[in-house]
Image (spheres, grey):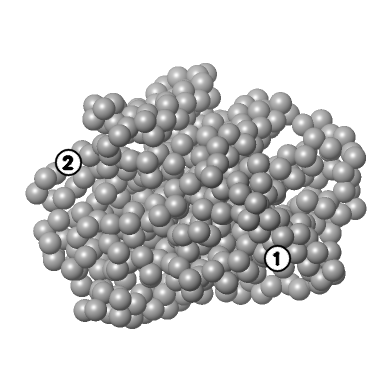
Amino acid sequence: MNTITIAWIALPFFIGFLIVLLPKLDRYLALFTAIISGIYAFQLFAQPEPIKLKLLDNFGVTLEADELSAFFILTNALVTLAVIFYCWGTSKTTFFYAQTVILHGSVNAGFICSDFISLYVALEVSGIAAFLLIAYPRNDRSIWVGLRYLFISNIAMLFYLVGAVLVYQAHHSFAFAGLRGSPPEALALIFIGLLTKGGIFISGLWLPLTHSESDTPVSAMLSGIVVKSGVFPLVRCALIIEEIDPILRIFGVCAALMGVIYAIFEKDTKRVLAGSTISQLGFILAAPEVGGFYAFTHGLVKASLFLIAGVLPSRSFNELQQIKLDTNLKIALVIASFSISGFPLLSGFGAKVLTMKNLAPWQVIVMNVAAWGTAITFSKFIFLPHGGRENIRSGFWLAVWLLLGGLFAANVVYYQAYTLENIIKPLVTIGLGWLAYGLIFHRISIKLPRLLEQFDHLVGFMSLMLIVLFWMGFTWLGI
């Protein structure tokens, strides 16, 4: 299995090069790469023990693939497959497919890293590939949004790299476990890099503009898989070092609440989905023990919602409320919205129940408020008028039903959730969300200021979060 793992890591980069040489096979080669990743993920689920590869023994450079990795890798495989299906028959060039495959491979590499230096390499490669895809339309707006993403990402990774060096200085090893016993500065610097990369809390205020202004399939990949590259190592570190767990839970709660507030008051469909992404990432961090399953569910549902948003006749909810949507499109939109709200029969239900059962007592009230806010947010989609008819490409339907089918299939992962108490609670939460939307939020028109999303403010917030993380490091690690 070790040889298979090495071949699987190298495959996307080889395929990315091959696509350039064989442009007529670009989408077929990209499809093949995603399918191989899916097969590898299922093999990981079947493995009784984690797969560990020591690359440089004296430096703690190690790869580890286990069930947690499998959830993230499978998410990457399915989202990439859906994006390729969505783009099939469009004018997307060989360059697009080559960068998609490289992004896919670099994110996968990050999902099996268990040391800070190999993770740094994976995050930097994925950041460059993501930038090239964001800037793919080559207009002034997309290039600026891409450069903005690249600048913020690079600043964050500079902090991260200094933190990784401090870990090595303390233990002569880059292993995640070395964070225990390292100076608090290492924790603060590494966490600010990962929190920013993952789009979490105010460090993630770059996310709404980037995700909403990117091309539709790129938005799906950014929200479905790319932000998970920053979330995964945070979850892994929390599971290895118990002192980090409360710090991560605090950021999870703050992100869940902040993101849902943004999403509730937004009137632009893609910005609503971007704000919801910040909130849902908070749910992953709020209960690290079950973060893999929640990340999988969120990746599928958010990718499907971004793809659906891309074919809606307008991005404005005010305009959409005056238009009858295609009935089949409305059904897909409702299914995805039901899942992210926690409705039974979809994996979003099991993921939310499992997360709520693994919260610390102090988290429960705030996370229930965030779940209620999610129900309010997606009422905007659920109650849009329907009855129209549109001619939508078959590639779109193949992509969306692949993702939605995954939500139905993954529902069996936590079938123990189906007790009367577990079913009633989310239904009540969703019902109260719909009621609040119909009576209050449907009538409210508040335009949130976007001043805080400007580039200079993003750097300022990063510095502010660094100070907070220094304080947390000294307090929780007792150093």
Q: Quadrant of the N terminus?
A: top left
Give the image location of residue 316, x and y in percent. 78, 56
- Name, please, the residue furthest toward the front: 420
Q: Is residue 460 left or right of residue 406?
A: left
Q: In the rendered image, which quarter is residue 459 located in? A: bottom left
Q: In the rendered image, which quarter is residue 307 located in? A: top right
Give the image location of residue 415, x and y in percent. 55, 41
Q: Which residue is mark 1?
A: 264
Viewer-proximal residue among 428 and 390? 428
Residue 123 has which mark?
A: none
Residue positioned 87% across, 35% down in the render: 389
Q: In the rendered image, which quarter is residue 16 located in? A: top left
Q: Which residue is mark 2?
A: 54
Label 1 Cα neighbours within 10 Å, binned few <14 / some 14-19 / many ≥20:
many
Give the image location of residue 89, x and y in percent. 65, 25
Amino acid type, residue under disc 1 in the picture: Ile
Viewer-proximal residue among 244 and 124? 244
Give the image location of residue 368, x and y in percent. 60, 66
Q: Secondary structure at mark 2?
A: strand
- Tell me which numbered mark, 1 or 2, is placed earlier along the sequence: 2
